[in-house]
Image: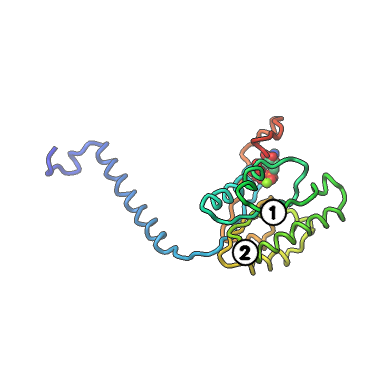
Amino acid sequence: MTDKMDDSSKSTDELKAQRHKARQQKVKAAVDAKIAKAQIEKGVLLVLTGNGKGKSTGGFGSITRAVGHGKKAAVVQFIKGNWPCGERNVLEKVGVEFHVMGTGFTWETQDREKDTLAAMGAWEAAEALLKDDTIDIILLDELTYMVSYHYIELDRVLEALKNRPPMQHVIITGRACHRAILELADTVSEVQPIKHAFEAGVKAQIGFDY
Ligand code: ATP
Ligand code: MG
């Protein structure tokens, strides 16, 4: 090969490689420009919603990531039946504060008054965390249902989220998140079910589903 070779004498593979490199350079320049522009540091409100599997898993993943960097984290679990929680077994040992709603939910207890009281108890714990600037990150697992079932007032939730310490990250999980919370959020991901083993008769299994 000589330096004098023009494109016409290059092999198809060489041309492909050259075009690929040029495309990647453009992509890198665009990504670098976006990275240079993204300079804000603030507490992010993340909502993980949708009907697919992975919302709570994702929330606990973020908590674990934060703890791994020495951050102070807390978890409030709304709707919690009698099932154990693998993540709690690990995270409490490394100092993550847990508050668990002391009952299942309407379809289990069929007692709206009892559920409302339990929901309020968990929400009050959440409110206290949302005022505490020593807490870096909070997971409000399955909070969406408390709002859709009117167990907790939407405005009260929005107020607490808006007035939280500016650097505090919050993750809300659950299906059918209220539009007003989605609007307030900085990042929203919707987990879509392509398929789920449950539909094929596979039961929820310890160490995988909870
Ligand atoms: P996970 O805790 O596994 O991340 P999730 O938080 O996305 O699930 P939830 O709606 O909170 O989903 O569901 C809790 C339980 O229901 C889990 O055991 C999960 O495997 C199961 N589940 C989640 N999505 C589906 C689905 N589309 N069909 C059937 N079961 C589901
Ligand atoms: Mg969940």
Q: Nearer the viewer, residue 118 or 4?
A: 118
Q: Residue at x 41, y 59 (%)?
A: 35
Residue 192 in view in this figure? no
Compared across the picture, whether 56 is left or right of 1 comes to right
Regarding residue 49, the answer to whether it shows in the image is yes
- How crowded is the residue under tag 2: few (<14 C-alpha within 10 Å), some, or many (20+)? some
Q: Residue 62 in the image: x percent, y percent?
A: 57, 50
Q: Which quadrant of the structure image shows residue 10?
A: top left
Amino acid type of the residue tagged 1 in the rendering: Val
Position of the C terminus by quadrant: top right
Question: In this orientation, which residue lies closer to the viewer: 96 or 54?
Answer: 96
| Relative horizontal placement of residue 12, taking residue 55 as reference (left or right) | left
x, y percent for residue 170: 61, 58
The amino acid on which the numbered mark 2 sits, given as a three-letter code, is Leu
Q: How is the image coloured?
A: rainbow
Q: Quadrant of the N terminus?
A: top left
Residue corresponding to mark 2? 184
Q: Is residue 175 above or below residue 196?
A: below
Numbered disc 2: secondary structure: helix
Nearer the N terminus, badge 1 or badge 2?
Answer: 1
Badge 1 marks a residue whose secondary structure is: strand
- The numbered disc on residue 76 is 1
The span from disc 1 to disc 2 (Cα, nearest Å) is 20 Å
User: Ligand 2 near label 2 (Cβ, under 8 Å)?
Assistant: no
Residue 38 position within the rendered picture, expressed as x and y whole percent measured from the top left: 44, 63
Quarter residue 204 falls in: top right
Question: Which residue is drawn at the image coordinates 73% and 66% (left, top)?
Answer: 156
Badges 1 and 2: C-beta atoms under 8 Å apart? no
Label 1 CA crowd tier, 10 Å (few <14, some 14–19, many 20+) = many
